[in-house]
Image: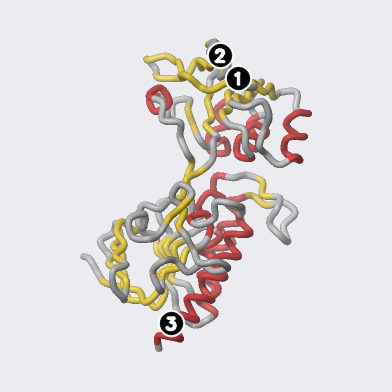
Amino acid sequence: MSETRKTKVLIIGSGPAGYTAAVYASRAMLEPILVQGMEPGGQLTTTTEVENWPGETEIQGPDLMVKMEAHAKAVGTEVISDLITDLDLSERPFTATGDSGTTYKADAVILATGARAKWLGLDSEEKFKGFGVSACATCDGFFYRGQEIIVIGGGNTAVEEALFLTNFASKVTLVHRRDELRAEKILIDRLMKNEKIEPLWDHVLEEVVGDEDPLGVTGVRVKHVKTGEITEIPAKGVFIAIGHAPANELVKDTLETHMGGYVVTQPDSTATSIPGVFAAGDLTDHKYRQAVTSAGMGCMAALEAEHFLAEQE
């Protein structure tokens, strides 16, 4: 049976931005409801070692998110396992519809839906997804012990994935369309020193090849961007690591966006183009995309929501 829930602040999303917003909103006695979405904990649940979270020399990504959820609950946040499928921002109170059938009415909304992996859009990539093609090394690297693996990309994501995969693979080939990486220097240094990783410069993925029965990857065809020459490389796994796109499906037609879909916020603020609607974390941050900056924006969003609600009263 469907029900209607009312709250002063509805937080949509459960990564560092969402949980931090929940902590601050709860401490402001706003009694927030947080709806976790499809992937509770967000991208950090698909990460292993997190070495840049202040106060933790090293912590597993999923463990950090479990701690954040527990913290949010401890200070009074109601955390609900549901997925918001529709969000009406045309009038206050705002109305969100959950996949469960529950309707949520809120005086203010904090959007913290994050981002998700980008894909190349190749037919062969789609065909072998889950059968040798993946966008999450920490989820699937374990399946390729002693095998040869391909990683596609040249930024932080690709280098981190390649380094992680050396824990399992016999060899990792990093395919990049340019002749130098765009990752942080410390990561590039680690990659270049790792004997299991071989960079392949100036190449793009042309096709994933594999067997039909059972379905599985046997290699890739890559194309040299200058000569057009095709090379076939044997591999059991292909990891696409070309970055992330903001999860903006709920608001892409109602809020102002830029830079490929990131929600626009006012300078030095999390306020969006609709009063009472705030955006935090990777949904709005096309520049830093770090857990700690997402958490900081979650804090800002909660404080701004509190201020907004006080003004309405």
Say which amino acid is labelled 3: Leu
Q: Which mark is residue 148?
A: 1
**Do the numbered discs 2 and 1 sit on residues whose CB atoms are within 8 Å?**
yes
Query: On the rendered structure, is 276 left or right of 58?
Result: left
Residue at the extreme left of the image, as rendered: 1
- Give the crowd class for mark 2: few <14, some 14-19, many >=20 residues within 10 Å: some
Quadrant of residue 227 in the image? Answer: top right
Which of 227/111 is in front? Answer: 227
SS at circle 3: helix
Residue 179, position in %: x, y?
A: 66, 25
Quadrant of residue 197 in the image? Answer: top right
3D distance between C-alphas at marks 2 and 1: 7 Å
- Give the crowd class for mark 1: few <14, some 14-19, many >=20 residues within 10 Å: many
Say which amino acid is labelled 2: Pro
SS at circle 2: strand
Q: Quadrant of the N terminus?
A: bottom left
Residue 243, position in %: x, y?
A: 54, 40
Position of residue 184 relative to residue 262, above or below, is above
Q: Quadrant of the C terminus?
A: bottom left
Residue 94, position in %: x, y?
A: 32, 71
3D distance between C-alphas at marks 3 and 2: 59 Å
Residue 251, position in %: x, y?
A: 36, 58
**Do the numbered discs 3 and 2 sit on residues whose CB atoms are within 8 Å?**
no
Identity of the residue drawn at 54% across and 79% down: 27
Say which amino acid is labelled 1: Glu
Query: On the rendered structure, is 109 left or right of 199?
Result: left
- The residue tagged 3 is 309
- The residue tagged 2 is 234
| Of the two numbered discs 3 and 2 in the rendering, the one whose residue sits closer to the viewer | 3
Query: On the rendered structure, is 205 left or right of 129?
Result: right
Sequence-earlier tag: 3 or 1? 1
